[in-house]
Image (cartoon, rainbow, N blue to C red):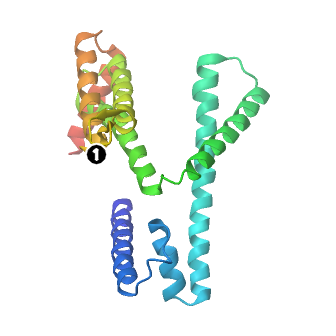
Amino acid sequence: IGMSWMIVTVIGAVFVGAVGVAYVNQHDLGGQLTDAEAIFILLSQIIFHPLVAGFLLAAILAAIMSTISSQLLVSSSSITEDVYKTFFKREASQSELVLIGRIATVAVCLVAIGLAFNPNSNILDLVSNAWAGFGSAFGPIILLSLFWRGLTRDGALAGMIVGAVTVLVWLYVPLLPSENGPVPLESLVYAMIPGFFLSGLSAWLVSTIGRSVEPKVADGFDVMSDTMTQES
């Protein structure tokens, strides 16, 4: 059900973009469309009654607010529990953790505001870069942990680090020569492709040449494998 709904929404988004391009070109509305990512808002204001357009715009705002609130909570709790408490102060009191969480929330808000004020950035590129980082850092590790018994802790860490660093270098470090000077490698191929490959390769190499898998982890993998075999 979840995948079916995602397919419908993706097709709808593509359809809105295609119809928007055709409508703007046919009616010569390029002057009203200062931002290509605002095509849905422009079509809502032109095609629908103002009351309906108001509901649609309110729905967009509600979706943005719900996403922002959840992402802020996840980011602040991750910084507080997974970073501060784990690596800096395990005996931190609850009041101290609350303070760190509030500071982290403000910091994440400032970073988001800085990204929003960049005139050269757009939502599609930011989301694409984020998914490249997530896919490269965690995708190979998840697949190897499900289908390979030999994945170790060090191999997983190496894969995540190499995948994330590869994407950052691919997107932001100017290494490709061009007529106007060096440019990032993202113009050649999507950053997730080399990041995914190098992440999986590094995880496999470190797991192979490093210490063996812990017996507890190996036993857990065997139990999962047997369960999947019986269910299939």
Q: Position of residue 229 (x, y in %)?
A: 20, 38
Q: Is residue 126 left or right of residue 59?
A: left
Quarter of the C terminus within the rendering:
top left
Q: Is residue 192 above or below residue 88?
A: below
What residue sits right under mark 1 in the picture?
A: 187
- Residue furthest front as drawn: 179
Frontmost residue, 149 versus 230: 149
Frontmost residue, 149 versus 159: 159
- Secondary structure under badge 1? helix
Q: Is residue 141 above or below residue 204?
A: below
Quarter of the N terminus within the rendering:
bottom left
> In the image, what residue occupies the spot 58% across and 71% down?
59
* Residue 195, quarter of picture: top left
Q: Is residue 113 left or right of residue 199?
A: right
Residue type pointed to by label 1: Ser
Q: Position of residue 108 (x, y in %)?
A: 63, 41
Q: Position of residue 141 (x, y in %)?
A: 32, 31
Q: Position of residue 184 (x, y in %)?
A: 33, 38
Q: Is residue 193 left or right of residue 114?
A: left
Frontmost residue, 67 versus 185: 185
> In the image, what residue occupies the spot 22% across and 40% down?
230
> In the image, what residue occupies the spot 35% across and 21% down?
158
> In the image, what residue occupies the spot 36% across and 76% down?
21
Label 1 crowd (10 A; few <14 / some 14-19 / many >=20): few
